[in-house]
Image (cartoon, rainbow, N blue to C red):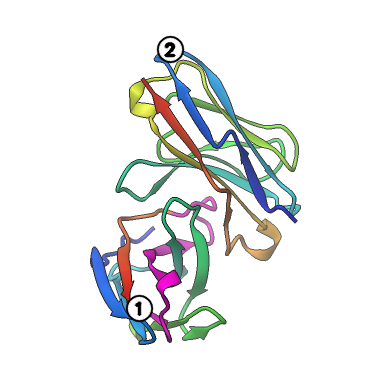
Amino acid sequence: NAGVTQTPKFQVLKTGQSMTLQCAQDMNHNSMYWYRQDPGMGLRLIYYSASEGTTDKGEVPNGYNVSRLNKREFSLRLESAAPSQTSVYFCASSDRDRGDYEQYFGPGTRLTVT
Amino acid sequence: DAKTTQPPSMDCAEGRAANLPCNHSTISGNEYVYWYRQIHSQGPQYIIHGLKNNETNEMASLIITEDRKSSTLILPHATLRDTAVYYCIVRSDNAGNMLTFGGGTRLMVKP
């Protein structure tokens, strides 16, 4: 099993450009999440999806949109990137049927907006 | 979810036990204590969780005080690969599946 995979690993955008971060998991998990981590800080939840077809806002949703494409894939879109969105983005998944006790994280996407 | 307080940094000698404290004085009865760690530049990794009783797995032990207001994560024989930021998180089952990460404790294991 690959676990949680994210693409791309690195990205540089100019202010105003758009992009989509991709996340996929092969563990048949129901729940998926997007977090961001700014330098020297803990992770903050952007959006999550408790099951296929549902999404909910987390702590810092402004400037982002998400799509739960199917059970495996959960994408994060920046419509008009801003320098404040420079961060490392982590995707995670968990098994709701087991109580969501353990979240499995991907390797992260390092995004720089100039 | 209850807030947690952790020391910003700690050192530990290789081969010795690392004891990482966490205060969660406002924890509610249905809230679990979770520990995750993040090794440099990687995604966080689940370590252990508990509600009331002490817990042990292949990675660590979790000791929760009887009043549940604090806990300690114990790495019994720390290695250099245990150098990481350790996050103590308190979460209830009905918290929308969210984990709220604070600043964590940066553990440095030294030879």
On whether residue B88 falls in the magenta region, the answer is: yes
Residue displayed at 70% across by 35% down: A53
SS for dot 1: strand
- Residue type (three-letter) at the residue carrying disc 1: Ser
Q: Position of residue A34 (x, y in %)?
A: 53, 41
Residue displayed at 36% across by 50% down: A42
Point out the stretch of residues depicted in magenta: B71-99
Q: Which mark is residue A6?
A: none
- Residue type (three-letter) at the residue carrying disc 2: Gly
Q: Mark 2 sits on what residue? A: A16
User: Subunit of mark 2?
Assistant: A
| Dot 2 alpha-carbon crowd within 10 angstroms: few under 14, some 14 to 19, many 20 or more | few
Q: Which mark is residue B71?
A: 1
Q: For the residues carrying marks 2 and 1, which lies nearer the camera in this image?
A: 2
Residue displayed at 35% across by 78% down: B71
Number of dots carrying numbers: 2
Dot 2 and dot 1 residues touching (CB under 8 Å): no
